[in-house]
Amino acid sequence: MNKRVKIFDTTLRDGEQTPGVNLNIKEKIMIAKQLEELNVDVIEAGFPRASKADFEAVKAIAQEIRKPEIAALCRAVKEDIDCAWKALEDAENPRIHTFIATSDIHMKHKLHMTKEEVIKRAVEMVTYAKGYCNNIEFSAEDAYRSDPDFLCELFTKVIKAGAVVLNIPDTVGYALPMDYGKFIKYIIENTEGIENVEVSVHCHDDLGMAVANSLAGIMSGASQVECAINGLGERAGNASLEEIVMTLKTRKNYLNMDTDINTKQIYRTSKLVSSLCGIDIPPNKAVVGKNAFAHESGIHQHGVLQEKSTYEIITPESVGINNHSNIVLGKHSGRHAFDSYLKDIGIVLNKEELDEAFEKFKRVTDKKKQITSKDIEAIVNSKKYFTETYKLKSFQVNSGNNMICTSAIEIRQGDKSLTEVAIGDGSIDSAFKAVERTIGMNINLKDYSIRSVTDGKDALGEVTVKIKDNDKILVGKSISQDIMEASINAYINAINKMIDDKH
């Protein structure tokens, strides 16, 4: 019988700490719903004490999501634990996840505490948290660089205090797989009472070892792995959920381990997170990258045509990538055909979402003759999770290599129509300046990028714009065959998110 490994997803907590990522509550709920479809065991919804927005997001997810456990992170501090519980109290399956640093370098330079003081604080706070619920996870921050015997003593005492999950992270991505596996094994063999609790691993990717270290940890006895969609997270990121899950599935006969993840939802989840976070998936990314199932070499192509398993150890279909090249959607396709197509590629929408997506689909078909599954995914993922204070009504851009670029923009604000003209160093610059003049705001643009959603001359272009407001990065996206239209809409979307974020 295969050992069941629990999947603890931290996309909404550690993943959102990725530089340049700032999700609003509606976007977090959408990701949480998709993680529920993916069938993760635990969703770490956020760090409630970090900000009012984090608190509200965790609370909303706790109220909305019923199947997975919902975890909230908190320091080993009473006020943090109180705040975490207040955010979690409506959850069907709440988990308080409290932590304190245990390495010598962290205790000396960050906490200014002795080992004895750290143990005392950890035991007191686990006991305190236990007063709210039974499901308490305790993490030893920077565990891998900690004295293993000190960890064994600490873990023995927090188990007695009521912790039911122990997390042993490689917080700074310093470990090597063989050493990390030995480290986990030593802790398990030398901690009293550990056989009665879950042992978890949480690895960062600073040296590119996060997935390998996580696998080494569960091969050495851990039963829960903490990971994030697309490997998002602090610095170089976390262990990638999709890579861990598909490794366990593909090598199940060797590892004798498996998860309850619905793997056919992996690609959909990956694309949604990428779209909402504004971080593109590298083409060579394992499992979900554009090239993961592409075969360029003639020898490889010949082999795959004869028998797919010659070069494909997992199938695209197993992670939810379906080839629908023989199905054509166009301007004459009806709502029912559109809905059926979505369901066929693993996308299920409610009535409101379907109405919005179908309306966008019909607008695209007015300009694009043939629609592919990639077009459909882009249309669905372009849903707006914010109030549209401003909407683009029309634009006109005059540009050329021997003329000053000029843009005229007309924007709707409720029932009002606002119009302005601006010049700039290029068409994009003049258009963005015209938007700023129209709404009367100076915007700090941090990043602008374009990518093609599909192939061919009539491909949809996706524009991503990032703006900065104080210490927050706001992401705006838009798709269109017209890059100028997509650019202006992406800029306005980012501004709308900034305005929404202030209310």
Image (cartoon, grey):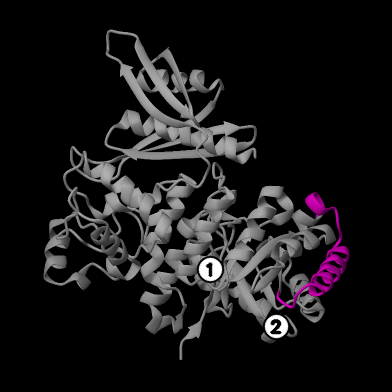
Within-10-Å neighbours for mark 1: few <14, some 14–19, many 20+: many
Between 104 and 404, the one nearer to me in the picture: 404
Q: Which residue is mark 1?
A: 214
Q: Amino acid at mark 2?
A: Ile
Taking the image as drawn, is residue 343 in sight? yes
Residue 344 place in picture, x, y as percent: 28, 66
**Extreme residue in the front direction:** 415
Residue 2 place in picture, x, y as percent: 46, 87
Residue 134 colored in magenta in the image: yes
Region of the chain picked out in magenta, as a range: 108-135
> Which type of secondary structure does the marked residue at label 2 adopt?
helix
Residue 400, relative to residue 267: is it above or below? Answer: above
> Does the magenta stretch mainly form a helix, a strand or a loop?
helix
Residue 326, relative to residue 193: is it above or below? Answer: above
Q: Which quarter of the figure has residue 91? A: bottom right
Residue at x 25% of width, y 46% of height: 454
Disc with the residue nearer the chain's start (2 vs 1): 2
Residue 392 place in picture, x, y as percent: 41, 30
Residue 473 colored in magenta in the image: no
Q: Which residue is mark 2?
A: 194
Task: Give yes or no for contact between labels 2 and 1 (Cβ–Cβ under 8 Å).
Answer: no
